[in-house]
Structure formats: C-alpha cells, structure tokens
Image (cartoon, rainbow, N blue to C red):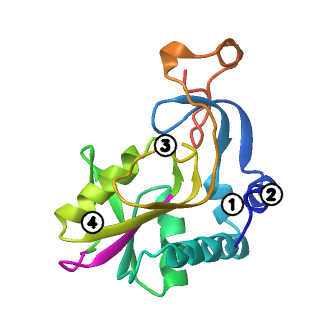
Amino acid sequence: MLTHDQVLDEFRAAGALLEGHFILSSGLHSARYLQCARVLMDPARASRLCAALAAKVKAGGAGDIDMVASPAMGGVVVGYEMGRQLGVPAIFFERVEGRLMLRRGFTIPRGARILMVEDIVTTGLSSRECIDGIAAEGGQTVAAACLIDRSNGTADVGVPLFALTRLDIPAYPADRLPPELQALPAMKPGSRGLAK
C-alpha cells in the first residue's frame, strides 16, 4: 500500500499538484488543483498508483468485480488501468446532451457487479451520475474508487468509496471566494487561457 505522502509525492513528481486560483469541473473554486492527466501520462506511475488502489478495493471487501465503468473524460485512463489491474473489462460513460450515457457499442450485462472509478472526487456529483447510468443499464455498482478524494471523506456517492488518499482542500462557490482567491485570475484547468 502507498502512504498518503507517497501518493502526493507521485503527484508532485509529475508536476500535477498545482497552486493558484482554479475553477473545478463542479463549478467550485479552489487554491489547489490536482491534474491527474499528468500523473497518468506515465504508464509506470499509473500502474503503481492503480495497483495500490486495486489492492485497497480488494482488501476492502468489495467482492467480485465483473467490470469497471468510469465517467469520461477524467476517469477514462484510470478506469482502463483499474480494469487491467483487476483483470476485467473497462468501459466509460460520455456526456450526451447533458447526460452520461454509454456509446461506442459498450454494454453492461444485466446484474453485472461494477466498480465505478474516477480520478478525483470533489463533490461526488459525476460519480453519482455514473452510478445512476450503471443502474439504468442493468448493472449493480458494488463500490467506487478514486485516486484522490478531495472531499476528505465527506462526499456521498451512495456506495463505499475507496481512495488512495483523502485531502481536505477547501472549494468555494463563486460568490463566496476568500480574498486571496479574489486577487488571482481564475484558470479552468484543461482550457486555454482564463475562464473569466
């Protein structure tokens, strides 16, 4: 198992622990951002992190897993690697007209035991949406997993959530920013230039 500090060291070594003023995919604002794409671009690092996460899921009593499902875009690589580590297929849901749906010929066998995997959980909203999509397709989500739980254990995704580590990184609505964030330009990671 990797310790909390070892997980953060992997993010630091990849240049994936950023500081500034960021708008998260949830719409909340934060002074710190975890850029999982930079961590997962190194196959050896992705393998180490996901092997540790897979071991945590197995030790946590999730039982047999038939398939891994993830929300695109952030969950695609980590979901694939978790499927590889667990020896099961990995599929992903894509947002179509505001709703997460399966495309590309992906299906879930009725009653399949699914592990829902994300890179980062902040509010748990996209995790819950993906879990709802799994249920609509006839699958049973037995657990969820992520590399980092930014909610420090407070996000409720409706099933047990396994995380390599948990962080308490405050996130704020746009109308309640602390002065230090108000003084910095807001960046939306993954985009080009300023969000506002």
> What is the crowding at mark 4: few (fewer than 14 residues within 10 Å), some, or many (at least 20)?
few
Q: Which residue is mark 2?
A: 9
**Quarter-wise, where is residue 63 in the image?**
bottom left
Sooner in the amino-acid sequence: mark 2 or mark 1: 2
Sooner in the amino-acid sequence: mark 2 or mark 4: 2
Sooner in the amino-acid sequence: mark 4 or mark 1: 1
**Dots 2 and 4: beta carbons under 8 Å?**
no
**Dots 4 and 1: beta carbons under 8 Å?**
no
Horizontal and vertical percent position of residue 106: 28, 74
Specify start and end residues of the magenta stretch as a single range: 107-118
Label 4 to label 1: alpha-carbon separation: 26 Å
Label 2 to label 1: alpha-carbon separation: 11 Å
Residue sitting at x 66%, y 65% = 41
Q: Which residue is mark 3?
A: 154
Q: Which residue is mark 4?
A: 103
**Of the two numbered discs 3 and 1 in the rendering, the one whose residue sits closer to the viewer:** 3
For the residue marked with disc 2, what is the amino acid?
Asp
Give the secondary structure at mark 4. loop
Above or below, 144 relative to 63? above
Q: Which residue is mark 1?
A: 39
Q: Is 146 part of what is drawn in magenta? A: no
Viewed as shown, does residue 166 lie left or right of 58? right
Give the secondary structure at mark 1. helix
Residue sitting at x 48%, y 87% = 87
> What is the crowding at mark 2: few (fewer than 14 residues within 10 Å), some, or many (at least 20)?
some
Give the secondary structure at mark 3. loop
Label 2 to label 4: alpha-carbon separation: 36 Å
181, 171: nearer the viewer: 171
48, 61: nearer the viewer: 61
